[in-house]
Image (cartoon, rainbow, N blue to C red):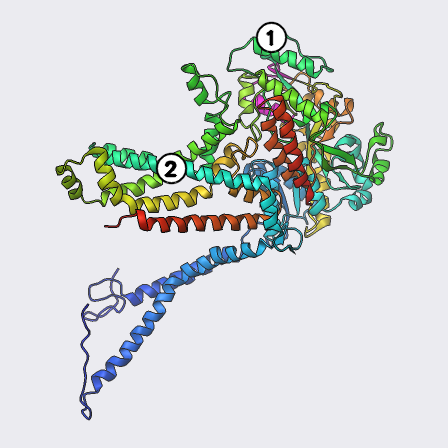
Amino acid sequence: MMSTPTLKSPPGTTTAAPSVRTQPARRQRSTAERLIAPLFLAPTVIGMAIFTIVPILGSILLAFFRWDIISAPEFVGFSNFADIVSDPTVRVSFLNTILFVVVSVTLQLGISMALAVAIQGRMPNWLRVFFRSAFFFPLILSAASVSIFMGYLFNEQFGVVNWLLSLIGIPAVPWLTTSGGAAAVVVLVYVWQNFGFSFLLFIGGLASIPKELHEASALDGATGWRQFTNVTLPLLSPTVLVASVMAIISALQVFDQPYVLTRGGPGDSTRTAVMVIFESAFQQLEFGRASAIGLVLMMLIMAITALQFRLSRRFVFYQ
Amino acid sequence: MRSTHPPGQENPLLSRTGDLSRRALLGALGIGAVGATVGAWPRLTGTDIPGRNSTSLNVAILGTSADAAARQALVDEFTSLHPDIPVRIQAIQGADWRDFFSKILTMVAAGNPPDVVYVATEGAQLFADKLAEPLDAYVTRDTADIQEYFQDVHPSLIEAFMYRGSLYQLPLDWNAANMYLNTSALQRAGLDRPADNWTHEDFTAVMRAMKSTTDGSFTPYYWTNRLFGGVVPWLYANDTSFLTEEKAAGGEWLWDRFYAADPTRAQRSGGYLWEAPNAESPRVIETFDYLRELVAEGLGVRPEGGGGNALVGLFASSRIGATPAGGYWVQGLNEAGMGADDFDVQFFPRWRTQRHQFGAAGYAIMRTAKDKDAAWEWVKFCASKPAMELAFPTPNTTPTRRSMVNRSFYATTGPEHWKVFYDTLDRFPTSGPIPAPPQQAAVESALMKNVSVAVSGSSAQVRSAMGSLQRDLELALRSK
């Protein structure tokens, strides 16, 4: 860093003029700089305060009230929390959500990484562009529209999937009306629609790995799977961390696919935590209870994310 | 653009390199921010929200902007009669009534409630209990004007909108869960249209006959998992319900005034009450077990949640033999290419009774309405025959006025036995509305959640599902 030259005059001399000129100029510049930074930050800070911080605080407060929108809120202490602990539907929905996260995130990351590695291999550039676009395309579609469409495809009596299966002699599968089938379809639709984002992250991560490392490892005899596990994967680990954090947070908030495809059924087999929040608030008009469930979910997300970063110290390799 | 600066002098807005200076950039950003704030002020302050700060009578309906536009003739007619009451139809989209009510409640929470809402039976008690204004005083005051409406409308439909002795809506359209039959499926099975008093065992036999004469892509009985047309019509036919049905006292002011001579006057009440679960009663279990057997035998589908969006297309393409629905289906089937003879309708099968389930809808005045008198004028106008003829030009629902359900209404669409629609009420006057207490959303969720489990497994699974339903209903009904 270059040092700024300063003018220093011996005591009693008349060379103070330059410093008289420079001192206010520096003060003005620093004042302006002090103003500019908050000015540029202001829109984001105000936006976050209005749309994130205040609602979170409001939701925390609301968790201690009973409120149905229409009547005045009534303070109920920890009653909403006691209520959700004793409610089997809430317990099942959280369990479903965690199972969903485990299965869907594993599939999402596995598939997207495999495809990203495959696309980085030798193939014509136009084909690579085609695959990148095709894999990313589902992400830009509306989850509700995709789910409606998939609901038709997986209809037991009239769906295309069962028709295709019937061509090879497989009897109709009750995809959306049995617990296992419904859960499988929800995971499938979710992963199909969301793996494109992780795929894009992995493409970027793979591109940042120096080719020399692969060439050097190849010279040492490491190819294929060995090269992937010993060179590619360690160098891709920061991307894996980011992709997994984002995938887990997103999966913990899954709503659209199970809501449209199965409405949480059959029974509670595909009911998720966010669905229970929605149902408590907008169907049962128990906004305090919904806030309490939301608060528990937020704490769960924070705990899992903190755990991920904690584990990353051991498993993530930075170049 | 030509420079206005003298030659040789530097443009203060440009740096020596010709780029925009930081000061100019900040100034432009500042002006932009101020401009954007001014431009977006109505949105930032919420003053551009439709209906807010408006003197118009805001009428909310479930539907799209096309549905709102379709009511323009109605609005124009009303405006010609009441030029001092401007009306604005606000269409609110929703997947179903439950979704629509959620959005209305959100509007209430946002401080922007509509003045009048078109509410179906599913939400009648929610609105009556928390949001709507009773019509008793208006109906009493305008007896002379409204008398003719009551004379034309079956009392069962009115009773569905009574709540604890007060009337909250004038029903304008309604539908019973009758049984639609695909004529070609019947003919393939060598069957005629079943008799009016056919039983649930006859129904099973018809479904078996249909199945035996078709391939695997055909489903004899298609039903959906929801409050209307799902398991409830079977429960009613078996003289039971998953909620204990009681009737409130009161309502004499209306029955004695408008229905004193009606043969069913004695059975009329202050409205229905559903305050306790009844899911574990033997008849409820028996009914669910019957449906489970239909599914297990491949005669009926495992029901999915929702309104059965694909149902019209599937029925019109003869891939379904029978399904419960009301008069609202006629126009849709016609538009899907079914001729008047391609389908027919019959009463729901008899079990212990032949009591039918029905749903209806009408306008409710919100307690927060700016001008309740004006809102009542709209409600009263919409219940008049000329207005209902404007509102219901085609059979995509059943008008509540008996005089409108006639041969000419179904002349181009069929079905042949269109009389079944209104005869349902006359032949079976104990027919009841969708069981929808003020906690309807939670009740419907509980029902939907457990129906699919109950009918998809063994007989033992029915009992455990009913136990689960009972617990869920207790939770749903605990708060009000």
Circle 2 sits in a helix, a strand or a loop, which is it? helix
Q: Nearer the viewer, residue A241 or A125?
A: A241
Circle 1 sits in a helix, a strand or a loop, which is it? loop
Drawn side of residue A80 relative to residue B201, left or right? left
Evaluate whether residue B411 shows in this view. no
Q: Is B87 above or below relative to A43?
A: above
Q: Position of residue B205 (x, y in %)?
A: 65, 11
Identify which residue is drawn at 41% across, 59% down. A44
Drawn side of residue A249 relative to residue A227, left or right? right
User: How many dots with numbers?
Assistant: 2
Q: Write down the chain letter for disc 2.
A: A
The magenta stretch is: B327-344
Marks 2 and 1: which is nearer the front? 2
Evaluate whether residue B287 shows in this view. yes
Name which residue type carries label 1. Ala
Work out which residue is located at the far bottom of the displayed protein and give it.
A12
Q: Position of residue B19 (x, y in %)?
A: 24, 62
Q: Which residue is mark 2?
A: A106
Identify which residue is drawn at 34% across, 63% down. B28
**Label ID, residue A122:** none
Question: Which quadrant is the C terminus of chain B positioned in?
Answer: top right
Q: Is B51 above or below relative to B192?
A: below
Which quarter of the picture shows residue A9? bottom left
Identify which residue is drawn at 28% across, 37% down. A116
Which quarter of the picture shows residue B262? top right
Name which residue type carries label 2. Thr
Q: Position of residue A303 (x, y in %)?
A: 44, 50
Question: Which quadrant is the N terminus of chain B positioned in?
Answer: bottom left
C-alpha separation, residue under disc 2 versus residue under disc 1: 51 Å
Q: Which residue is mark 1?
A: B189
Q: Nearer the viewer, residue A99 or B399?
A: A99
The local crowd at label 2, few if under 14, some if 14 to 19, many if 20 or more residues have their Cα within 10 Å, is some
